[in-house]
Amino acid sequence: MTTNLVAVGGTTSLASTMQFTAIPTAVAVKPDSAYALLELAYKRLDIPIGRFDAATRSVTNEALKVRRRIGGLAMQAVVDCGEKLGVANAETWDIDMNVLSFVVDDGRGGSRVSTRIQALGHDPIVAGRDYSPCSTKGALEAKIGNTVKLLTVPAKK
């Protein structure tokens, strides 16, 4: 991404790179079991699933349109898109997300459930506005992982 700054006497370009890191959660079940629970976790959190891939034990939604809430969380707790007049843009903007969760063997008899989020947002009131990158706060990734972890615990009678 390149940003141009225009000032008296010239223009300066700043280049930056957006990185997206998957946030892992340790789960005390084998990877195939964790993968089955991952699908259930998405359903429990009302996150639409776009694609399953059993070969890579991944669940994704590459074109998720979100406004105000996801997974029971307010968008301002999930992503940071800046703010305007003291109000988090994530609360009022349309957010396009790519959510990917996958399961890997932890080498100790359990597994790791990792989730990576990419998000772009824009103000729906301003016509023709470009999308702005939003950074994750890690809350949704943690909630997905913790939901899988909770699903591994047998219900008490």
Image: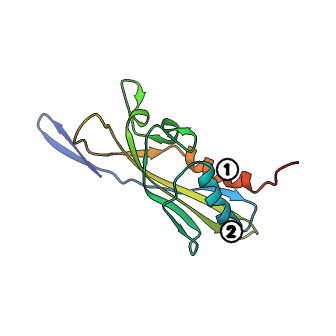
Q: Nearer the viewer, residue 141 or 63?
A: 63
Vertical relation: 97 (above or below) 69: below
Dot 2 corresponds to which residue? Answer: 31
> Quadrant location of residue 55?
bottom right
Q: Position of residue 53 (x, y in %)?
A: 54, 70
Badge 2 local density, few (<14 within 10 Å), some, or many (20+)?
Answer: many
Q: Is residue 58 left or right of residue 96?
A: right
Q: Position of residue 132 (x, y in %)?
A: 33, 44
Q: Is residue 49 left or right of residue 144?
A: left
Amino acid carrying label 2: it is Pro
Q: Is residue 2 left or right of residue 66?
A: left
Q: Position of residue 153 (x, y in %)?
A: 79, 54
Dot 1 corresponds to which residue? Answer: 146
Q: Secondary structure at mark 2?
A: helix
* Residue at point 73%, 54% (across, down): 151
Amino acid carrying label 1: it is Asn
Badge 1 local density, few (<14 within 10 Å), some, or many (20+)?
Answer: some
